[in-house]
Amino acid sequence: MKLQRLLICSLVLLFVMITFSEAFALSYGRIRALKERAITVTQQKNHFVTRVLDSYNIPYECNQEGVVVRLKVDDHWNDITRIDIIPLVNDDGRGFRVMAHNIFFDTNRGIFHLVSELIIR
């Protein structure tokens, strides 16, 4: 009787351990994939912003991660606190198509606005 009880408890414990470890592994894999995607999107955003600034010949400075942190406008360097990129879309009957992007730079001297037809890639 005790042996049977011990065997049943062992099987239940083994089942629970396998179930939770598999669920944890799936969750960990999803979290890792989301983190990798976030890094890729951030790199694309930073690269896009620098390409737009280069196309307008606007001097800028980046930090070690490639984020634009300073912008030179009217012979003054402005510290950037936030960059917002907003797509301008057109409904062509088959769906929405991105035509351009509004880029807003929040700085210590105000908000600077650029419009670019460059594609984010």
Image (tube, grey):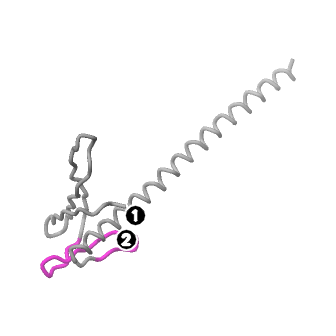
Q: Which sits in the foreground, 110 or 98?
A: 98
**Image quadrant where residue 80 sits:** bottom left
In the picture, which quadrant includes the C terminus? bottom left
Majority secondary structure in the magenta region: strand
- In the picture as drawn, the residue positioned furthest to the bottom comes out as 75
What amino acid is at disc 1? Gln
Residue 63: assigned label:
none
Q: Which residues are magenta?
A: 61-79
- Whether residues under marks 2 and 1 lie with C-beta atoms below 8 angstroms apart, the answer is yes
Task: Give the residue type that dot 2 points to.
Answer: Gly
Magenta span contains residue 63: yes
Label ID, residue 43: 1
In this rendering, the answer to whether 70 lies above or below 41 is below
Depth check: give the residue in front, 100 or 102.
100
Dot 1, crowdedness within 10 Å: few (<14), some or many (≥20)? Answer: some
- Residue denoted by label 2: 66
